Amino acid sequence: MVRQPPDKDVVESDLSVTSPKQWAAGIPGVAVSLRRSVEQMGVTRTAKTLRLLNQREGFDCPGCAWPEPSHRHAAEFCENGAKAVAEEATKRRAGPEFFAAHAVADLAERTDYWLGGQGRLTHPMVLREGGTHYEPISWDDAFTLIAERLRALSTPDEAVFYTSGRTSNEAAFLYQLLVRSFGTNNLPDCSNMCHESSGAALSETTGVGKGSVSLADFELADLVIVVGQNPGTNHPRMLTALEKAKRAGAKVIAVNPLPEAGLMRFKNPQNVRGVLGKGTELADEFCQIRIGGDQALFQAVGHLLLTWEAANPGTVVDQDFVENRTIGFAEYADSVREIDWDVIVAATGMAREQIEKVARMMADSKRTIVCWAMGLTQHKHAVPTIREIANVVLLRGMIGKPGAGLCPVRGHSNVQGDRTMGIWEKMPEKFLSALETEFGIDVPRTHGHDTVSAIRAMRDGKAKVFVAVGGNFAAATPDTDVTEAAVRSCDLTVQVSTKLNRSHVVHGRTALILPTRGRTERDTQASGDQFVTVEDSMSVVHRSQGRLEPASEQLRSEVDIVCGIADALLGPGHPVPWQDFPRDYDLIRDRISRVVPGCESYNERVREPDGFVLPHAPRDAREFTGTRSGKAAFTANELTVPFVPEGRLLLQTLRSHDQYNTTIYGLDDRYRGIKDARRVVLVNPDDLTALGFEDGQLVDLVGEWPDRERRAERFRVVSYPTARGCAAAYFPEANSLVPLDSTADTSNTPTSKSIVIRLEAATRPAAP
């Protein structure tokens, strides 16, 4: 049995619980944003920084990827965006003196919350093999060390190059160019763990692995369906778009196992109604679905739509669209013509009458948007679930028309841009050929490792060097004990980072920390001040330029770091001019314009006030040239219902309101009424009674998987109105329960939203 020890500086007895909130944002959101910002940055720095956040002349939020509106407010940010900026622009520092005072073994006992609170990294640091402390190293020596270890490998495929979504387009393009110049496609990224399932399903059904809506579509929609998503915490600025949709007459359906405050009512702090009034009621219909029941829901909706169409031909199905722009309709219709309503009701936990109401709202809507996030993407049957959403959207012809479409809401700020720039282990031939033509290099064609296969390769001794540009790999990934052991087996680990995190203390035999400038900071190179570009979740590419002075003179930009590694590794005779790119980022964008589809005239177009929108054939022209047939594809999918044995629960991991991805801002989850604790498990009160546990009891979470059990110790039970048979706990604390081999079909995404667990009384007492 694998045991994950609790964090020593989070005491479960500190927990206090109040009733969940019934609305999001409002004055408390403003107050928390300002308080956290002032604590980290001071008054003057706060005023200077927040006024530039998400503004045309400023920098893109380092948090989520929600797009900016054409008409921007003076405060175009949310509470979590302000927290993200405060974390990066903090005045706190973690320099050589800090590392001299703290042995790595001591740091390894700390939580990510504590580690992140130590401030910005200021100097490149090295942990020598057998050493106890990180110590300073020069940039040149660091680059030389990396190059020597990479060249010593028996094959380039023994190296893994990870990327976080905060990397700029310019840095991402150069990073993948470096990796492929070296000779491998081992380019796992954070998308492998979140929206890979969306990309897989959409590429198959519409030919483009991205969403097909713009921000303006929300104000034109009749119906917006939000599935498996908590916008109030994960994408707070989305609430403004939903509010505008409601004001324009749209209906909103929320489908989620938990009744999240941000799905119910929004008090917009940017208007009087939000500050002094009741705000805007968002969800017209709340569907409290059981975890993993979404495929059953959308199969049932498709069944009902086709039944009503058969009774009244031409009133429900968009016959012209289906006949002329799709394939596979007959096979799909056969697959949902007969359904077992007992199975549907059991899988969803919803009454048949409510499912019929949802289907009727879809049938009556002329313009429908369906949004989703990781509540759908992190299941074994995630890809079939998203295919079913595409099926009902195609039935109604809700793609390529104003106010309608498919909207996967991606999280990290440039995760979509990274993929556009080539951060993918299996980029298409057209992209690879363009790289070869542009740079005169040979590019490997063998597919590389994604995140899960990279962990397996390190575990099995087939990967010996790990390099990460951004992110917190050790905390973000599944099966914590297995992942940490895999990383520790590497000969060298390299982390390009702004702040200290778990991945710096879970290290290879030799480890490097390379400190980089953040989004908020000025990037001055030989040709002057530089800007970078990012892509939001709706395919808009725009510029971002920091204005603060860097936290240390030792900091280098991500572009500069990538080029420094490449120059040391590949040598001055390499055909790529690595030494030129850091001097002037326009030179990078010129190359992007000739390699990346849709990025022609890149330098000119990103200098437009709002940047430019990448082409999307289904959205722009109702064309589906990216599919094998050249048409949108209906799919027939066998229904999967998660099986949960008697006496067990289906656990999903989720974020608290005081975190973004693995970055922990604080220990409160304000909207869920949880204060001063993170090791909690949310369970329906009826399930607690049936299982014989009490609210507030200390329990161990025991994950059940064929290879072995996994135990996460000492979690406080919180009685919470989640769906029956379901439970929830925060990540990364519960990541240890996610088996490495439990992944989504097709996408290989870890199944962090469907973990079978049982509760046991805690095996050890609470910390003093």
Image: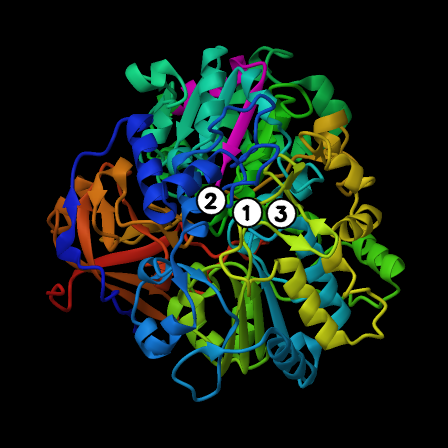
Mark 2, Cα crowd under 10 Å, few <14 / some 14-19 / many 20+, is many
Q: Earlier in the sequence, mark 2 or mark 3?
A: 3
Residue 196 image offset from top left, x and y in percent: 57, 50
Q: Nearer the viewer, residue 368 or 115?
A: 115
Question: Which three-letter amino acid code belongs to the residue tagged 3?
Answer: Ala
Q: Nearer the viewer, residue 535 or 132?
A: 132
Q: Contact, CB < 8 Å: mark 2 with mark 1?
A: yes
Q: Is residue 368 magenta?
A: yes
Whether residue 195 is situated above or below residue 112 in the rendered picture: above
Residue 512 image offset from top left, x and y in percent: 52, 74
Residue 609 occupies quadrant? top right
Residue 733 occupies quadrant? bottom left
Q: Earlier in the sequence, mark 3 or mark 1?
A: 1
Question: Mark 2 or 3, which is nearer the eye?
Answer: 2
The magenta span reads 355-373
Question: Which three-letter amino acid code belongs to the residue tagged 1?
Answer: His
Whether residue 363 is situated above or below residue 656 in the rendered picture: above
Residue farthest to the bottom? Answer: 130
Left or right relative to 351: residue 402: right
Q: Quadrant of the N terminus?
A: bottom left
Q: Which residue is mark 3?
A: 200
Residue at x 88% of width, y 64% of height:
440
Q: Secondary structure at mark 1?
A: loop
Q: Secondary structure at mark 2?
A: helix
Question: Mark 3 or 1, which is nearer the eye?
Answer: 1
Left or right relative to 581: residue 648: left
Q: Which residue is mark 1?
A: 195
Structural distance between the alpha carbons of marks 3 and 1: 9 Å
Q: Which residue is mark 2?
A: 374
Left or right relative to 450: residue 693: left
Q: Quadrant of the C terminus?
A: bottom left
Whether residue 192 is situated above or below residue 345 in the rendered picture: below
